Image (cartoon, rainbow, N blue to C red):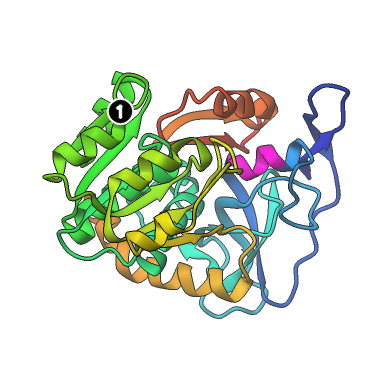
Amino acid sequence: MKGILVKEGEKRNTLELTDMPNPDIGAGDLLVRVDHAAVNRTDILNREGKSGYAANPILGVEAAGIVVDPNGHESFSDGDRVMGLVNGGGYAEYVPMPADRAMKIPSALSFADAAAIPEVFLTAYQTLYWIGKLQKHETVLIHAGASGVGTAAIQMANQLSEAQVIVTAGSARKLTFCQEIGADVVVNYKEQAFDEEVLKATANEGVDLILDFIGADYWDKNFKSIKKGGRWVLIGMLGGAELKNFNLMTLMSKYIQLTGTLLTPRSDVYKAELSNEFTQAVMPYMEEGKIRPIVDTVFPIEKANEAHEHMENNRNIGKILLNMNRQ
């Protein structure tokens, strides 16, 4: 089969399409012929050698495709269309997919749509509900609103919780799109002080929940934006990981719950339970078209390097995909 491996270079590691053996599958896996895979920032970190998410040398943590070997799992048959999180290996023609986190693709969704779901929607669901405990009619601030996780979180907060959704993004195009999928208040962080806009939108109370992809650069403004007793979930560090001269009393004085989380390093059991609950809670909304995966650009697998550059340049609204159907 063909798959993507990282070729080390002096300045920037590159992705190389390579011949390799078909993967072995464990007792708990299905063998899936990949139709589309998705690009995630964890893939970029892995390519750069800054983080390793799995022993698998092939990049890719999510895929959508067709079951070619159910491997004894009675819930699946040859030809079933499935999507799910994988332990690396998504950027290839075949991948082992744990059966307990494989989700059958609704008939209304294409393989491209399906590949845009697992990582970002499960991350957003985990962050909003398992950790953030978002309740009906609360207010949530979602940074990077036009990202894959951001677009998923906006829709779920709107549809599942009827929340007031405030988002930040860096262009009018991205903000307009966020409004189209359910954001109530949009803030251009390049032109506006988002903490001031949040306070205006919440009668100076602040938000109940923050989904924070940015980290250090937004620390002070996030603190001003959250209400007393609010929940703050840190899921990224695009703006840095280190704070200077931080006084813990500031958190205590507003009795804020601050939680950090990642999805990719979580246990197989955790991911399976999350996938199952997501399927029950959110998939009906997708089948009805009330929540939809957002696809930005689909690159052929031969242009995986360009796909990574597209994400690194923050050009995308929603997901960047790789089409494994080679021409």
Taking the spot 41% from the left edge, 66% from the top edge, the residue there is 131
Left or right: 2 as drawn, with respect to 315: right
Magenta segment boundaries in residue numbering: 39-45
Residue 118 sits above or below residue 204 on the image: below
Question: In the rendering, at what x and y percent does residue 16 appear?
Answer: 80, 31
Q: Nearer the viewer, residue 283 or 230?
A: 230
Q: Residue 325: x percent and y percent?
A: 61, 36
Q: Does the segment drawn in magenta span residue 40?
A: yes
**Up-down relation of residue 33 to residue 147 (above or below):** below
Residue shown at 43% from the left, 37% from the top? 147
Instruction: Provide the secondary structure element on which disc 1 rests.
Output: loop
Q: Position of residue 55 (x, y in %)?
A: 80, 58
The residue under the point 75% across, 42% down is: 50
Instruction: Check the image and report above or below for 165 versus 31.
Output: above
What residue would you read off at disc 1? 193
Looking at the rendering, which quadrant does residue 287 occupy? bottom left
Q: Is residue 174 left or right of residue 272?
A: left
Depth order, front residue of 224/284:
224
Is residue 60 shown in magenta? no
> Left or right: where does residue 263 sit relative to residue 259?
right
Q: Is residue 13 above or below residue 4?
A: above
Quadrant where the N terminus sits is top right
Please provide percent x and percent y for residue 12.
Answer: 79, 24
Q: What secondary structure do most residues of the magenta stretch adopt?
A: helix
Q: Nearer the viewer, residue 297 or 177?
A: 177
